[in-house]
Amino acid sequence: MIRTYPRSSPAESQPGLNPLDPARCVVRALDEADGGPGAAIVNVVGPLGVGKSRLLATLAYDFVDLDRTPAGGRGPLAIDGVDTDHRAAAAARFVDRTGHGRFVIAGRLPLATRPGWAHRPLVTVELGPWPPAGIRALAAALGVTGPAHAGLVVRLSGGIPLVTDSLCRAIRRDAEPEPPEGALADAAATEVLRRLGAESRGIPPEALPIVAAVDGADEDLLTALIGLRPKAFTRLRRLSVIRPDRHGLTVAEPYRTLFDLAYRWRHPVRRDELAARAAEHRHRQLARTADPPLRARLADQVLYLSGSRRARRDLYADERAEFSVRRAVDGDDEAIGRLMRLWGEHEGLAERQVERMRELWLSGADHGFHLAVDTDDHPVGMVNLTPLDPVGAPALEPLLQQHADTLLDLGGSVVGMMAVEPRAARAQAALVRHILTTGIAGGRLVVSTPWVPYQEMSARFGLRRVGDTRHDLYRCGRPSALYARTFTGRNLPAWLHRMRDPYAEGPGRAAELVRTALRDLRRRGRAAASGPQAPAVLLRGAVEALASSASAVDAEAGEILRLYYLSRAGGHDLLAHRLHLSRATYFRRLEYGIGKVAEAVGRALDPP
């Protein structure tokens, strides 16, 4: 049986410095696991750098070296660093050879997810990130006491002691009054990558930072960006800091933020080029997907990579993922009431009308309340997203009034309120992002609000003003304005195009110009496409150089471009067959090659 003990706050005794509470959990778990016919096994699980090794050292158990034959001891035996399938298999063999005894085995992922462990009885003790008070105390113990520096450590560390240690050492070493976040993140990211060494064998070192920098990637996108081989993607999928998402793989926080900030600091131009190419790739994918939730996630990524600066401020002010959004559940009544009152006070709404709307929303088949919560699951913001379903939604009539007949038949959701605690202002971005992705996935979004700033935001995101309500619903001296937009697979690319940053088009535009110029080389005699184009000799030279590259992936991509565009040796299907490539691999190499040629042409036309 697997049971999980929640982490106790390390701040209960000496904040951030006393691991006795987790130690008591381990001792209690050992007592619970003991008594069976076989070995008693406790699995200590937690993210990289959370303090598993330190906890085992505190317990003063005998450590087992799996590469040697250990000397048996009477007390519990500790096996640390079980972070790969290979180490997990070695630990299983050791336990089987011993046959009995008590073992504490630490790793970044639960043993139950490893081959050969699902059938074994064990008890799991989870170590989670430390609370902010604990991180501040640890930073003070490491010599970082200034409020600004300590606040920066708390924000970037994500509650991970290893990251805290790296950040504090970088702050003390550089002795800057206002250290750049990118430089600090780079120091911590370098240490994280070093610690991932055993897990990440066979994975190109740039893969993980690039997945973080572009907000997630599938195999096709990574192949287009860096020529990643299929086996490397499979290995990347197994990393403890990687999480699966609808659109591919993402990096777990706080590591994503660290890698992203570090990559922006180290490679600012390269990062912008990658963002533009990734946004182009996702645009093409959007045109092919019929899955609404995936379409919403891809649109969100395109906005993150290429959206206008104002849109990115509205959506991604919470870049460090301090807040998440979840549906309100039983037990959230107090939070709903508190945030409803905050909403009414902030927007100057009549208290009685606010209470009436709360009752109407809660009496519906779907109450529509979604909460923004911090890392301790404390609600700090709220939005109401009521489905546009005339059956079982009594709040819709006062929200839509005379426009109900026009808007109810088309589906989607209506935003009726949003409130955020002033101390957690960045949570608003998480809520707005949730609203938009919900609207895209549902196909339609309607906003009903008397609050002018939210009306202006609705207009910025391209929602059409339907009109005002006939009655002043909230007795605030202002009618509610209604905004609406329909999102479909057909109109989404055009909307994203209007939302993009005009200053972020350069690298992507270069790739498209190169694609057009190569096409014109293949179709001799065709008039040049509009816009500046690279000289033919430069294009030919870049393609030939790529085809003769020492990198097998680059050479393969270059050969495809040479055969298709320069030699005109056949169509895509014929060349894929000739090169013994699947169609998917062939087109991945083709896109990758065009990107590499665009980079080479860009360097030649605009040298440093």
Image (cartoon, rainbow, N blue to C red):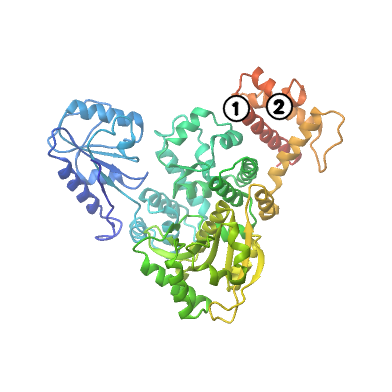
Please tell me which of labels 2 and 1 falls first in the chain: 2
Q: Horizontal and vertical percent for residue 206?
A: 53, 37
Q: Which residue corresponds to mark 1?
A: 585
Foreground residue among 337 and 352: 352
Q: Which residue corresponds to mark 2?
A: 561
- Amino acid residing under circle 1: Thr
Q: Is residue 399 above or below residue 156?
A: below
Q: Horizontal and vertical percent for residue 459?
A: 65, 64
Q: Which is closer to the viewer, label 2 or label 1? A: 1
Circle 1: element type:
helix
Q: Horizontal and vertical percent for residue 553?
A: 60, 26
Looking at the image, can residue 607 be seen? Answer: no
Task: Assess disc 2: are there few (<14), some (14-19) or many (≥20) residues with their C-alpha within 10 Å of its C-alpha.
Answer: many
- Amino acid residing under circle 2: Leu
Q: Which corner quadrant of the image does residue 286 belong to?
A: top right
Q: Which corner quadrant of the image does residue 452 belong to?
A: bottom right
Q: Which corner quadrant of the image does residue 400 belong to?
A: bottom right
- Left or right of residue 64, residue 362 in this image: right
Task: Assess disc 1: are there few (<14), some (14-19) or many (≥20) residues with their C-alpha within 10 Å of its C-alpha.
Answer: some
> Which quadrant, please, contains the N terminus?
top left
Q: Is residue 607 above or below residue 142?
A: above
Q: Is residue 20 above or below residue 385?
A: above
CA gap between label 2 and label 1 equals 14 Å
Q: Horizontal and vertical percent for residue 274?
A: 61, 42
> Which quadrant, please, contains the C terminus?
top right
- Left or right of residue 537, residue 93 in this image: left
